[in-house]
Each structure stands twice: as C-alpha cells, then as structure tokens.
Image: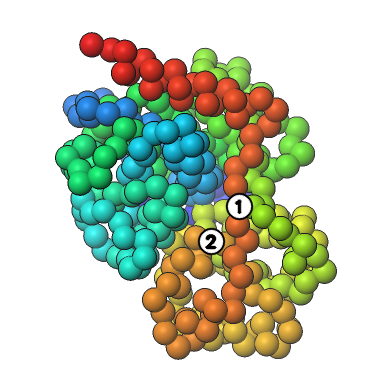
Amino acid sequence: MPLDEPAWWYARAPHPLASLLSPIARLYGHVAVARLKRGRPFRCPIPVLCVGNFTAGGTGKTPLAIALCDQLAAAGESVVALTRGYGGTHKGPYWVDPANDRAREVGDEALLLAAHARTVVARDRQAGARAITEGPHAATVIVMDDGLQNPALEKDLTIAVVDGSRGFGNGAVIPAGPLRAPLAFQLELADLIVVNEPVGSDGAIAEGLRRSFTGPVLRASVVPRGDTEWLKGQPVIAWAGIGNPERFFRLLESLGADVRAQRVFKDHHPLGTAEAAELLALADTEKALLVTTEKDLVRLKGGRGDLLALAETSRALGIALQFLGTDGERLAELVGSALHGRRAAP
C-alpha cells in the first residue's frame, strides 16, 4: 500500500487521526493476515533468503540484501536478487541490465542490487523464482528483497529489518500507523531480526525485541563506505527521496559536513526538471556541494538537461551495513545453517 508517511505515525503523543483511522486499520490488518494464511507458497528448487520489514517506509532492508549478496558471493554462491522493482514499469520476470536499464523501467532498488548480483524484477515473485531457476544464468541461492508479507514463495530464512531509531512508531497498522500487519502476527513470519540503529545507540529497541521475539535479534548500523574526508567542513546541500531521509542527513552532519539546506522528496520520487533546476540554483547560491544517496543518484541515470547536470554535479555518499560485535559472524552462521538444512533435506 504505497502512501506518504505521516509524521504523526512516529509522534510521542497519540494523534487523533490514529483513533479515527483505527477501524480501517483493523480491516487492513485482517485482510493482510488472511492473505498470508491462505497463500500456497511455491517451493523453489534452490534456497530463498528473504529480507523484509514489519513497517512501511525505510528501515535499511536493501543495504542488508546487498550485504547478503556480497557475503554469499564471497562464499562461492551464485546469487540472484529478486525484487518487485517498485517505481519501474517492468512487471517481469525481467533480468536487469545495469548498463542500459533505467530506474523508471526497473526501479531504483533493482539497479542498486544489480551492481552486486544478477537481479530479476518480478511483480509475481513466484514467476520470478521460476525464471531464475530456468536460467539463462546459473543460480544457487535467491536473495529476495522485500517479501516478508508475500506468501508466493516458501522461504528458507526470513530476516526482518527494524529501524532502531523509530521502532514501530505508534504500534498501529496502516493507515493508522506504520505496521503492515499486526506486529504479533508478523513476528511469527520472521526467523531473525536485524535492528538497524544509529552508531552509539543504547540498543533499547533490540533489547525490547529480545523480550517478545523468540529468535535471534542482531544489531547493525549504517556506516559510510570509503573515504569521507571530502565532507569535513564542506558546505553541502543535502537532498534525498528515500524512506527515512533524516537518517541520511544525520549521517552527513556526523561526518562533519556543513549542511546548509536539506531537500526531501517522496521515497522513489523521480525528480522533474524544475526540481533539478531548483537544486542546482540553490547549490550555486550557497556555493555548496550537492550530496545525495546512491539510490537517489541512480534515478537520474539517463536524464537530460538539468537532470543530467544534477547527476553530474551531485555526489553520492556510499553506505554499508556494519554489524556490532560478533553479530556479523552470527548472521553468516544462520545463513549457512539455512542453506545446509535446505540442501540436506530429501
């Protein structure tokens, strides 16, 4: 259910709209649960690892899916990422061509994934899994980006990513809150949870989950990838159209950037020429560098005029997911166990 994320979903005080929308939220939750219960998942011939989230909006699931793809490839697996291709026109199944495809065709997340692994876009995930197993490229494991609430495929390991700053907001189901279905039911869908929290977090949300969730709860943080010296003291115009842009802006500030202005767009928003021109003019006025996310920059691929100029003058801050302590090794063990268990099964 794509929609704009209301700020009051995460407000400290109860909001009147949450109460007003609660009947619709109960219906939405009931339909979501019923859909999942009556689903007849397809058992793919190769293992399926799913990365999803309990809430609408950004939690960091795509960075985790990318990390999984990289980890599996390093272990010798032939990985294929499977994604819905949100924001693109291709219904699929379609093998992404990262050199020639555009975000308007396959979606921005598909292009990010395709930089790390072969990627298939498919609205029908079952059809996508069948296309992967039929080839033309060899595959030993599928990493499914987003699909916790999708009953089309049987999953060998399901990982839910939780925002360690915002948690579950007011705890209500869409549209009264951010949850995609009642939390108690969704917890039963996950094998493990990764809490994506700010660096230096006290881990309160992770600790709370350990009291209500019987599986492993791991902690990770989004950290910059590569050198960041170029940001120190640098006047910056920060712009982003992602699920949680505040996380990106805070990261820039923590790295010493002098953020002169912030511009927020809807998640997956394809910028128009007027918006690009405004950003370029603002950067010129402030004598500042335009900085954005990799996800936003990839959406400008193939643009012309001011969109091309924006792509050429904006610099993306690369990120990666870094696990706390030994949680990275724990994740690798759980993934390895899931693959071994599936392959050992008759």
Rendered image quadrant of residue 281: bottom right
Give percent across and percent down for residue 17.
50, 49
Which of these two is toward me, 321 or 263?
A: 321
Residue at (22, 27) in percent of width and height: 45
Which of these two is toward me, 130 or 146?
A: 130
Q: Residues within 10 Å of mark 2 (few under 14, many from 20)?
A: some
Q: Residues within 10 Å of mark 1 (few under 14, many from 20)?
A: some
Q: SS at mark 2?
A: helix
Residue at (35, 37) in percent of width and height: 78
Which of these two is toward me, 248 or 26?
A: 248
Most extreme residue toward the right is 233
Label of residue 50 in the image: none
Colour theme? rainbow
Q: Is residue 294 above or below residue 260?
A: above
Q: SS at mark 1?
A: strand
Question: Marks 2 and 1, Cα distance to the nearest angstrom?
Answer: 8 Å
Q: Is residue 342 above or below residue 101?
A: above
Q: Is residue 184 left or right of residue 240?
A: left
Give percent across and percent down for residue 187.
45, 25
Label of residue 319 in the image: 1
Q: Is residue 316 left or right of residue 102?
A: right
Can you identify the residue that label 2 sits on? Answer: 294
Q: Is residue 341 left or right of residue 160?
A: left
Residue at (67, 60) in percent of width and height: 249
At label 1, which amino acid type do we have? Ile
